[in-house]
């Protein structure tokens, strides 16, 4: 199992790096080929409306990227997980899920770009105003996620096991978190991986358990997995990470503003808010995202360690936590002990081995 996991993650890393290289090369090519200005001129011949020209350039870029990167996305998202037993969806079902995700992501992405360019044409401080609007948009998405978006990908039913349901509700109440119910998502229809989540905000907040978790884990192990997610809520981790992302968004858009103004001179765009410069803006924001990713991952690992500590304290059951980690590692084919540099650069969670060692130490201290 360990060798299988290493092989799987090694191939995932190779395919991920190839995908990143292909995406980067794609944007460099369309920048130097002048695709942005060409589409912007064509769209301007039909209508001078900024929103229309932005939509035309964004759609052309997104469709081209999807076509260029699809073979690697298929290898990484379908062929490889299916080969290693993580996925058992048919290709048709996988493609339907991918299409739904693309439509939702495309709609949100287009809305984001339209907001950015509308503000860009309105105020020199567009980068600051846009960051505020985008943070508000993320909050709205988090609110509607369990009600409108999650049901597009999973069938959600109330947890039928009354004993487990009561145990889960008692744990949530002990953490002092109000929820509207406990629901089960039919993950087994797609693959074998297991997880739990506390999804939504306020009146939409609910516990979501994968049916693979309910079926294959002991009740105490289910509680241990959920307790980790409750820790994120108690520590306000969603908001903490949102503040971090907001700061990075301000930085990225400010840098985009500086380089768009420079790019208007270099590439001959009419103005920084000319949609012809969208490929350049994507390159700038994407490059900054790559540079800051290790820092974001380091912060995230710290947040995850705190959530583990909370779970151990809330349940008082390190043995169940360790059992849950072992079972999750097997079901999700986790790389238990990745190379330290790989963990530092790429992992948003501590490795499974580190999490188990921390829980073992906690159990020893408790006697």
Image (cartoon, grey):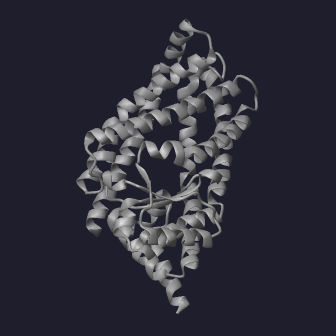
Left or right: residue 224 versus residue 334 is right
**Looking at the picture, does residue 186 appear above or below residue 57?**
below
Indicate the quadrant containing the N terminus: top left, top right, bottom left or bottom right: bottom left
In the current view of this chain or complex, which residue is farthest to the bottom? 367
Q: Quadrant of residue 332?
A: bottom left
Residue 363 visible in the shown view: yes
Left or right: residue 41 versus residue 155 is right
Percent coordinates x, y for residue 221 in the rendering: 43, 74
Residue 72 visible in the shown view: no
* Residue at position x 49%, y 36% in the image: 105
Percent coordinates x, y for residue 273 in the rendering: 65, 22
**Looking at the picture, does residue 205 appear above or below residue 364?**
above
Of 309 and 357, the residue lying toward us: 309
Q: Quadrant of residue 95?
A: top left
* Residue at position x 44%, y 82% in the image: 319
**How many numbered circles are shown?**
0
In the current view of this chain or complex, which residue is farthest to the left? 83
Percent coordinates x, y for residue 128 in the rendering: 73, 37
Of 224 and 257, the residue lying toward us: 224
Left or right: residue 14 versus residue 181 is left
Percent coordinates x, y for residue 328 in the rendering: 38, 67
Of 64 and 83, the residue lying toward us: 83
**Looking at the picture, does residue 22 appear above or below residue 240?**
above
Left or right: residue 311 versus residue 176 is left
* Residue at position x 44%, y 78% in the image: 320
* Residue at position x 63%, y 49% in the image: 245
């Amino acid at each position: 199992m360990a060798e299988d996991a290493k092989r799987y993650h090694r191939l995932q890393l190779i395919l991920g790096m190839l995908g990143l290289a292909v995406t980067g090369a794609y944007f460099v090519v369309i920048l130097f080929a002048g695709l942005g200005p060409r589409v912007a001129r064509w769209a301007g011949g039909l209508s001078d409306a900024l929103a229309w020209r932005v939509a035309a350039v964004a759609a052309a870029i997104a469709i081209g990227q999807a076509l260029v990167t699809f073979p690697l996305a298929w290898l990484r998202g379908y062929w490889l997980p299916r080969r290693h037993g993580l996925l058992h969806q048919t290709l048709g079902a996988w493609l339907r899920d991918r299409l739904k995700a693309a439509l939702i992501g495309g709609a949100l992405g287009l809305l984001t770009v339209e907001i950015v360019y509308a503000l860009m044409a309105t105020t020199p401080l567009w980068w600051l105003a846009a960051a505020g609007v985008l943070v508000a948009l993320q909050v709205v998405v988090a609110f509607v996620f369990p009600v409108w978006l999650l049901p597009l990908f999973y069938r959600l039913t109330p947890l039928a096991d009354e004993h487990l349901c009561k145990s889960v509700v008692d744990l949530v109440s002990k953490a002092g978190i109000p929820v509207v119910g406990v629901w089960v998502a039919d993950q087994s229809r797609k693959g074998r991986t297991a997880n739990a989540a506390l999804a939504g905000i306020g009146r939409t907040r609910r516990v979501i358990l994968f049916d693979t978790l309910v079926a294959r884990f002991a009740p105490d192990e289910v509680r241990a997995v959920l307790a980790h997610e409750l820790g994120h809520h108690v520590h306000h981790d969603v908001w903490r990470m949102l503040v971090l992302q907001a700061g990075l968004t301000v930085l990225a858009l400010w840098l985009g503003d500086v380089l768009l103004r420079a790019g208007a001179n270099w590439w001959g765009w009419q103005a920084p808010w000319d949609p012809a410069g969208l490929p350049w803006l994507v390159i700038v924001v994407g490059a900054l995202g790559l540079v800051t990713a290790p820092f974001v991952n380091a912060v995230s690992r710290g947040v995850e360690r705190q959530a583990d500590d909370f779970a151990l304290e809330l349940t008082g059951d390190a043995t169940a936590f360790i059992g849950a980690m072992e079972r999750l590692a097997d079901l999700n084919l986790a790389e238990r002990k990745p190379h330290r540099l790989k963990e530092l650069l790429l992992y948003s969670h501590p490795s499974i081995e580190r999490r188990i060692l921390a829980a073992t130490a906690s159990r020893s201290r408790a006697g």
